[in-house]
Image: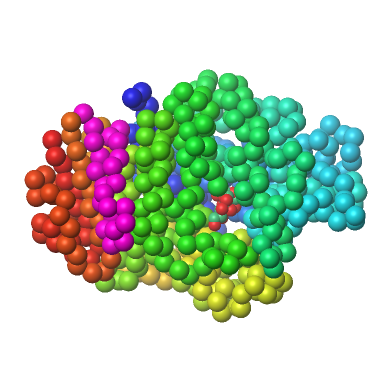
C-alpha cells in the first residue's frame, strides 16, 4: 500500500466564524484561531480544514465568494492569514482551505459582468438559458428550497443556482472558467497551504440538455441531486485539475460529493486515479430521510443501527485497497454527532461520545473531528423559527410549511431541531465564563446554553474527559499501521444493538465492539483472548457490555 501523509492524518475542522473572536466584534477570526492552535495541536490533529474565509456577502456563511484572493474583513487581513499559516506550520499543523467553485457569489465581478449582456467576455462564465413558455427552463429545485433558476431582465434569461439565488453556478463547460479556477487554486497553493476540501465538487458537470428532474407528488420542484451529481464530464474536469494544478504540489484533497457511491468514489480517488485523494460521502448522514419525498432530509426519526452499519461498512469494504475514505460523524452542515447517532441525555452523553469516537476512529480512512465534537457538544434544541439563522433551515420551513403545505409548523420545528445545520454552528464552548470565552462582544449567533457544563477548560486537564479520550484515539492511530491501513471485516450486520468489526493487517487483528444502546447486553467475540487497547469504562467486563460501552482489543 502506497503510504501518503494524509492517510495517517487526523483532520480538525474549524468553522472560523464560530471558533474564537479576538477583537470583540462577536465573530470568530484568524488571530483568534492562531491563539487556539496549541489546543488543536495538543488534541493530536495533523491538519486543520478551514471553512471559507474569503470575501463574501455571507448569504450562505461564506459559501458565496465574491473575491477568491482576499480575506473576508470580519476574519482579518491577508497578513493575519499569513501569520496563522506560519504559526500552524511551525507547530507542524497543515492547513487545508475550502474550495467553493461549483458557484460564486452573485456579487463576484464575473457574475456582475455576465448578467449585463449575452456578448461580453464573462457572458458564458455562468449557466444562462432562455425562458420556456415564459417560465424557467426546467423544473429544478434549489437545495435551499424554491426554484434553481432566477430571471435576469437585463439578459432576458434565467441563470442556474443549485443553492441560493446569490450563488450562481459556474459554467465548467467553458475552458476559460476552468483556467480561472486553476489560477486561484495556484494562488493559495503558492502561499503554502496544504490542500483543499472541494465544496460539492461532484455537481460541477451538468447533464446535457438540462432535462427535468424527478418531482415528488406535491412538491413544487424536481429533486436535482440524482441528476446533477457525478455528471458526464466530472472525471475529465478532475483529471485536468490534477494535471494542471494538484499534481504539482504535495497536498491533500477531499471532494465533498453528495449522492456519490463507492463506485463513483473509486473513480475519483482510486489510488491510480490521479484525481482526488478522498471524498466526503453522504450515505450515513442521509439515513432516516423522510419517507415523504417532499420533505427530504427533514425528519425526527432515530437512525436504525443496522442501517448505519450497512452504510459505513459498505464504504469500508468497497474502497479497501481501491480508494481512500474520509471518516466523519458531523461537520458544519450536520447535527451534532452525540445527539444524532447516540444520545445527549446527560446520564450517558460522555460515555456515548467516547463510544462514537472509538467506532469511527478505529476504521480505515482519514478521520475528521468537527470543532466541539472532541468535547461532546450537543444539538442546541431550538424551539422557534426565529432562533435559526441558517438559510437552508429557514427557507425549508417557509417552503414546506407555508408554500407546499407538506407539513405543519410544529412538526417542522421538531425536524429543524433534529436536523438543522445551526446545531453545529453555535460558537465554540471554551469555558464557563460569559459567552464561553468565545467573545467579549455580542456573539454573532447565540451559544448553546449548556456551555457552563460542556467546555474545553473543564476537559483539557481531565484525564477522563472526552477531549483526552479523543487524544488517545488519535495517538493510537498515529502509532498503528493496523488502524490506518488494515482491512475491515464487519461482524453480525443484522445486530441492531452492537456495532462490532475487525481490522486485519500483517498478521495482527483489531476487534472493536460498541454498544449503541442504553441497555446492558452480552456479546462474545472471543475478546477475552485479546489485549484491551482502549475503552470508555475504567475496565471491561468480559462479554458484558454496559450502556454505550465500547472496547478495542488487539490480537497480535
Ligand atoms: O454543502 C453541500 C450540500 O450538499 C449541503 O447542502 C448538504 O447537503 C446539506 O446542507 C445537508 O443538510 C456544501 C457546504 O458544505 C454547505 O455549507 C454549503 O451551504 C453548500 O455546499 C453550498 O455551497
Q: Where is residue 426 in the image (x, y as percent from the top left)?
A: 48, 62
| Position of 218 relative to 549 (above/below) | below
Answer yes or no: is residue 317 visible. yes
| Position of 182 relative to 258 (above/below) | above
- Does the magenta segment cover residue 529? no
- Does the magenta segment cover residue 503? yes
Q: In which quarter of the image is the C terminus?
A: top left
Image side of residue 493 versus residue 139, left or right: left
Image side of residue 411 versus residue 432, left or right: right
Q: Residue at x 25, y 40 (%)?
A: 503
| Position of 172 relative to 461 (above/below) | above
Q: In which quarter of the image is residue 177?
A: top right
Q: Position of residue 382 (x, y in %)?
A: 50, 73
Q: Give the range drawn in magenta.
A: 484-506
Q: Residue at x 46, y 55 (%)?
A: 285
Q: Which residue is drawn at 23% across and 48% down?
A: 512
- Towards the viewer: 474 or 263: 263
Q: In which quarter of the image is residue 542?
A: bottom left
Q: Residue at x 14, y 61 (%)?
A: 544
- Towards the viewer: 78 or 216: 216
| Position of 120 relative to 164 (above/below) | above
Q: What is the image's colouring?
A: rainbow
Answer yes or no: is residue 46 visible. no
Q: Where is residue 493 in the image (x, y as percent from the top left)?
A: 31, 53
Image side of residue 420 versus residue 505, left or right: right
Q: Position of residue 281 (x, y in %)?
A: 48, 45
Amino acid at each position: 500500500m502506497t503510504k501518503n501523509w494524509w492517510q495517517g492524518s487526523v483532520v480538525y475542522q474549524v468553522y472560523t466564524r464560530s471558533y474564537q473572536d479576538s477583537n470583540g466584534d462577536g465573530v470568530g477570526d484568524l488571530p483568534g484561531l492562531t491563539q487556539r492552535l496549541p489546543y488543536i495541536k495538543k488534541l493530536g490533529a495533523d491538519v486543520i480544514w478551514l471553512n471559507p474565509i474569503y470575501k463574501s456577502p455571507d448569504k450562505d456563511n461564506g459559501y458565496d465568494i465574491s473575491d477568491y484572493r482576499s480575506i473576508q474583513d470580519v476574519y482579518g487581513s491577508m497578513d493575519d492569514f499569513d501569520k496563522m499559516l506560519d504559526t500552524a506550520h511551525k507547530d507542524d499543523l497543515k492547513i487545508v482551505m475550502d474550495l467553493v467553485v461549483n458557484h460564486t457569489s452573485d456579487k463576484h465581478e464575473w457574475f456582475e459582468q455576465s448578467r449585463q449582456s449575452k456578448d461580453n467576455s464573462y457572458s458564458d462564465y455562468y449557466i444562462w438559458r432562455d425562458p420556456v413558455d415564459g417560465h424557467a427552463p426546467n423544473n429544478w429545485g434549489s437545495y435551499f428550497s424554491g426554484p434553481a433558476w432566477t430571471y435576469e431582465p437585463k439578459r432576458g434569461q434565467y441563470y442556474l443556482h443549485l443553492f441560493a439565488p446569490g450563488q450562481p453556478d459556474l459554467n465548467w463547460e467553458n475552458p476559460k472558467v476552468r483556467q480561472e479556477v486553476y489560477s486561484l487554486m495556484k494562488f493559495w497553493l503558492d502561499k503554502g497551504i496544504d490542500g483543499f476540501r472541494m465544496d460539492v465538487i461532484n455537481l460541477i458537470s451538468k447533464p446535457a440538455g438540462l432535462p427535468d428532474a424527478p418531482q415528488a407528488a406535491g412538491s413544487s420542484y424536481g429533486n436535482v441531486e440524482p441528476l446533477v451529481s457525478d455528471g458526464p464530464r466530472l472525471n475529465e474536469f478532475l483529471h485536468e485539475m490534477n494535471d494542471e494544478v494538484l499534481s504539482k504540489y504535495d497536498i491533500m484533497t477531499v471532494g465533498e460529493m453528495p449522492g456519490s457511491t463507492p463506485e463513483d468514489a473509486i473513480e475519483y480517488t482510486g489510488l491510480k486515479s490521479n484525481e482526488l485523494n478522498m471524498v466526503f460521502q453522504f450515505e450515513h448522514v442521509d439515513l432516516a430521510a423522510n419517507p415523504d419525498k417532499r420533505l427530504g432530509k427533514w425528519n425526527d426519526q432515530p437512525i436504525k443501527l443496522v442501517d448505519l452499519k450497512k452504510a459505513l461498512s459498505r464504504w469500508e469494504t468497497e474502497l479497501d485497497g481501491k480508494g481512500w475514505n474520509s471518516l466523519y460523524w458531523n461537520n458544519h452542515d450536520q447535527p451534532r454527532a452525540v445527539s444524532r447517532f447516540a444520545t445527549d441525555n446527560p446520564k450517558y452523553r460522555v460515555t456515548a461520545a467516547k463510544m462514537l469516537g472509538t467506532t469511527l476512529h478505529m476504521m480505515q480512512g482519514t478521520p475528521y473531528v468537527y470543532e466541539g465534537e472532541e468535547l461532546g457538544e450537543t444539538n442546541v434544541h431550538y424551539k422557534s423559527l426565529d432562533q435559526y439563522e441558517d438559510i437552508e433551515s429557514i427557507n425549508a420551513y417557509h417552503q414546506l410549511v407555508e408554500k407546499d403545505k407538506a407539513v405543519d409548523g410544529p412538526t417542522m420545528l421538531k425536524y429543524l431541531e433534529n436536523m438543522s445545520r445551526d446545531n453545529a454552528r453555535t460558537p465554540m464552548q471554551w469555558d464557563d465564563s460569559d459567552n464561553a470565552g468565545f467573545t467579549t462582544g455580542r456573539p454573532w449567533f447565540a451559544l448553546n446554553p449548556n456551555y457552563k457544563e460542556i467546555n474545553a477548560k473543564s476537559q483539557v486537564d481531565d484525564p477522563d474527559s472526552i477531549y483526552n479520550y479523543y487524544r488517545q484515539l488519535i495517538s493510537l492511530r498515529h502509532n498503528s499501521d493496523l488502524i490506518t491501513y488494515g482491512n475491515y471485516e464487519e461482524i453480525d450486520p443484522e445486530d441492531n444493538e452492537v456495532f462490532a468489526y475487525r481490522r486485519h493487517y500483517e498478521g495482527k487483528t483489531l476487534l472493536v465492539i460498541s454498544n449503541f444502546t442504553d441497555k446492558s447486553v452480552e456479546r462474545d467475540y472471543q475478546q477475552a483472548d485479546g489485549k484491551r487497547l482502549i475503552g470508555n469504562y475504567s475496565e471491561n467486563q468480559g462479554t458484558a457490555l454496559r450502556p454505550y460501552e465500547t472496547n478495542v482489543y488487539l490480537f497480535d
